[in-house]
Image (cartoon, rainbow, N blue to C red):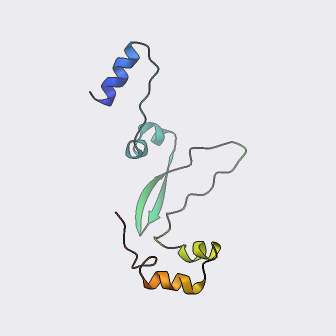
Amino acid sequence: MTCSEIVTRLSEVKVVVAKVNSVGEAATSEQLAATGGYVDLIQNGRPVKSVISPMIMSEISTPEANPVPELNAHAHEILTSFDFSSDEIACYEARGVIGKTAQKVA
Protein backbone atom coordinates (compact mmCIF):
# COMPACT_ATOMS: atom_id res chain seq x y z
CA MET A 1 0.00 0.00 0.00
CA THR A 2 1.37 3.41 -0.94
CA CYS A 3 1.60 6.36 1.41
CA SER A 4 -1.08 8.14 -0.61
CA GLU A 5 -3.41 5.16 -0.25
CA ILE A 6 -2.85 5.03 3.52
CA VAL A 7 -3.60 8.75 3.89
CA THR A 8 -6.73 8.42 1.75
CA ARG A 9 -8.06 5.38 3.63
CA LEU A 10 -7.42 6.90 7.06
CA SER A 11 -8.94 10.22 5.99
CA GLU A 12 -12.08 8.42 4.80
CA VAL A 13 -12.69 7.12 8.33
CA LYS A 14 -11.98 10.55 9.85
CA VAL A 15 -8.50 9.81 11.24
CA VAL A 16 -6.41 12.98 11.29
CA VAL A 17 -3.40 12.05 9.22
CA ALA A 18 -0.78 13.77 7.09
CA LYS A 19 2.21 12.52 5.18
CA VAL A 20 5.64 13.59 6.36
CA ASN A 21 7.72 14.48 3.31
CA SER A 22 11.23 13.27 2.70
CA VAL A 23 13.89 15.96 2.30
CA GLY A 24 13.71 15.55 -1.48
CA GLU A 25 9.92 15.83 -1.51
CA ALA A 26 10.00 18.88 0.73
CA ALA A 27 12.65 20.49 -1.46
CA THR A 28 10.49 20.13 -4.58
CA SER A 29 7.20 21.05 -2.93
CA GLU A 30 4.80 23.20 -4.98
CA GLN A 31 3.64 24.79 -1.73
CA LEU A 32 7.19 25.76 -0.80
CA ALA A 33 7.74 27.27 -4.25
CA ALA A 34 4.46 29.21 -4.04
CA THR A 35 5.40 30.73 -0.68
CA GLY A 36 8.91 31.77 -1.76
CA GLY A 37 10.53 29.09 0.38
CA TYR A 38 13.59 28.69 -1.85
CA VAL A 39 16.79 30.63 -2.28
CA ASP A 40 19.27 30.19 -5.13
CA LEU A 41 22.90 29.82 -4.05
CA ILE A 42 26.17 29.19 -5.88
CA GLN A 43 27.94 26.07 -4.57
CA ASN A 44 31.20 24.91 -6.15
CA GLY A 45 30.58 27.24 -9.09
CA ARG A 46 27.11 25.94 -9.92
CA PRO A 47 23.63 27.14 -8.99
CA VAL A 48 21.91 25.21 -6.20
CA LYS A 49 18.37 25.66 -4.93
CA SER A 50 18.14 25.63 -1.13
CA VAL A 51 15.26 25.78 1.31
CA ILE A 52 15.09 28.94 3.43
CA SER A 53 14.61 28.94 7.17
CA PRO A 54 11.13 27.70 8.08
CA MET A 55 10.93 30.25 10.90
CA ILE A 56 10.06 33.68 9.56
CA MET A 57 8.86 36.25 12.08
CA SER A 58 7.82 39.82 11.38
CA GLU A 59 9.93 41.36 14.15
CA ILE A 60 13.12 39.35 13.55
CA SER A 61 15.31 39.56 10.46
CA THR A 62 15.95 36.26 8.70
CA PRO A 63 19.64 35.38 8.42
CA GLU A 64 21.10 35.49 4.93
CA ALA A 65 21.46 32.05 3.32
CA ASN A 66 25.02 31.10 2.45
CA PRO A 67 26.50 28.16 0.56
CA VAL A 68 27.61 25.17 2.61
CA PRO A 69 31.31 25.41 3.58
CA GLU A 70 33.77 23.12 1.84
CA LEU A 71 34.69 19.90 3.62
CA ASN A 72 37.19 20.67 6.41
CA ALA A 73 36.89 24.42 5.78
CA HIS A 74 36.69 25.16 9.51
CA ALA A 75 38.57 22.17 10.91
CA HIS A 76 41.41 24.25 12.40
CA GLU A 77 39.08 26.75 14.07
CA ILE A 78 36.89 23.99 15.51
CA LEU A 79 39.77 21.87 16.79
CA THR A 80 41.51 24.93 18.22
CA SER A 81 38.31 25.89 20.04
CA PHE A 82 38.47 22.46 21.74
CA ASP A 83 42.07 23.17 22.82
CA PHE A 84 43.83 20.93 20.30
CA SER A 85 47.37 22.19 19.74
CA SER A 86 48.79 23.11 16.34
CA ASP A 87 51.04 20.04 16.57
CA GLU A 88 48.06 17.75 17.23
CA ILE A 89 46.14 19.26 14.31
CA ALA A 90 49.19 18.85 12.04
CA CYS A 91 49.42 15.20 13.13
CA TYR A 92 45.76 14.65 12.20
CA GLU A 93 46.38 16.26 8.80
CA ALA A 94 49.47 14.12 8.19
CA ARG A 95 47.50 10.96 9.03
CA GLY A 96 44.64 11.98 6.70
CA VAL A 97 42.12 12.36 9.53
CA ILE A 98 41.34 15.95 8.44
CA GLY A 99 42.22 18.03 5.43
CA LYS A 100 42.01 17.41 1.72
CA THR A 101 43.25 13.83 2.10
CA ALA A 102 40.59 12.90 4.70
CA GLN A 103 38.81 9.75 3.59
CA LYS A 104 35.05 9.48 3.47
CA VAL A 105 33.73 6.98 6.01
CA ALA A 106 30.79 4.90 4.82
- The image quarter in which residue 25 lies: top left
Frontmost residue, 16 versus 40: 16
Residue 22 x/y as whole percent: 39, 42
Residue at (55, 83) in percent of width and height: 88
Residue at (61, 44) in percent of width and height: 55
Asked if residue 56 is positioned above or below residue 74 in the image, the reply reads above
Residue at (63, 72) in percent of width and height: 82
Frontmost residue, 70 versus 39: 70
Residue 43 x/y as whole percent: 44, 65
Residue 97 x/y as whole percent: 44, 76
Q: Is residue 55 left or right of residue 4?
A: right
Q: Quadrant of the N terminus?
A: top left
Asked if residue 60 is positioned above or below residue 71 in the image, the reply reads above
Residue 66 x/y as whole percent: 54, 62
Q: Quadrant of the C terminus?
A: bottom left
Residue at (63, 55) in percent of width and height: 63
